[in-house]
Amino acid sequence: MIISEIYEYLNKLSPFYLQESWDNSGLLVGDFFSDITTIVLSIDVDEKLIDSLESNTLLITHHPIIFGALKQLDFSQYPANLIQKMIKKNISNIAMHTNFDQTHLNDYVVTEILGYEISCKDGFVAYMDVDEDFDAFAKTVSQAFKLPHSKCVKTTQRVQRVALTTGSGCSLIKSVKADCFLTGDIKYHDAMEAKSINLSLIDIGHYESEHFFAQILQKHLKNLGLKVIIASSENPFTYIY
């Protein structure tokens, strides 16, 4: 099967036009006429993963390896060092980022990982009604994402309506219509802003909330008759207890 056929299948599953204007989802490395027999799924591209792949593999990732404009390819620097290895091994890459967030990832995390029903959706934000004690809810959330601790901004003792955005969603704080927001990459000033508007936060991690990408997509790609492997890259962070 050639890449263009796989791309069209992915486009029907999660249309690439849904991606944000700042995003770079789509075919990033390779060409549409390459013949593919093996697909590998991962949240990211890293050197260890590339070294483990066979030549002529299609790597489908959540995060784009090429995000901003590339003005030069210095093979001693990221991401050119990884792109060079990919080209030498004829490894193609398609990224499915913000389009997949909207169509699949947020829904899956709410229903399959946290076990709640989605009460409504607004773009990248999925809402659920929980009506639980905040501390107990925070512990449940941390356990679901296998986090070493609960990093929270607590503005109320009870949680009623919860919003969730996987990955890094703090730019949405002002528009969230809930009393608690679950997202990753929460910074100090995000916490200060949330506290000032009485919005509780629970940090669910970036990698931890998005690494489900591969297992979600694998279920759909099995219908193509190709070998599909989950080989998620490793979390770049190490927790020392």
Image (cartoon, grey):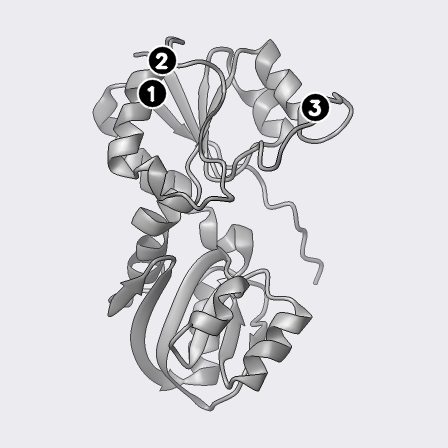
In terms of sequence position, does the residue under pointer 3 or pointer 1 come before the other? 3
Q: Are marks 2 and 3 in contact (CB under 8 Å)?
A: no
Taking the spot 31% from the left edge, 48% from the top edge, the residue there is 104
Q: Amino acid at mark 3?
A: Asn
Could you tell me the amino acid type at mark 1?
Lys
Horizontal arrangement in the rendering, residue 109 relative to residue 28 (left or right):
left
Q: Is residue 143 above or below residue 201?
A: above
Looking at the image, which residue sits at the far left? 223
- Secondary structure at badge 1 equals strand
Q: Nearer the viewer, residue 100 or 158?
A: 100
Who's the residue at 34% across and 38% down the image? 17
- Residue 94 screen position, x and y as percent: 44, 27
What is the CA distance from the residue labelled 3 to the residue labelled 1?
Answer: 27 Å
Q: Are marks 2 and 1 in contact (CB under 8 Å)?
A: yes
Q: Which residue is mark 3?
A: 81
> Residue placed at 58% from the left, 69% from the top?
149
Q: Quadrant of the C terminus?
A: bottom right
Dot 3: what SS? Answer: helix
> Residue 37: which numbered mark, if any?
2
| Lateral position of residue 116 relative to residue 34, left or right | left
How crowded pointer 1 is (Cα within 10 Å; few <14, some 14-19, many 20+) is rated as few
Which circle, 3 or 1, is nearer the viewer? Answer: 3
Looking at the image, tell me whether mark 2 or mark 1 is earlier in sequence order: 2
Where is mark 1, residue-wise? 227
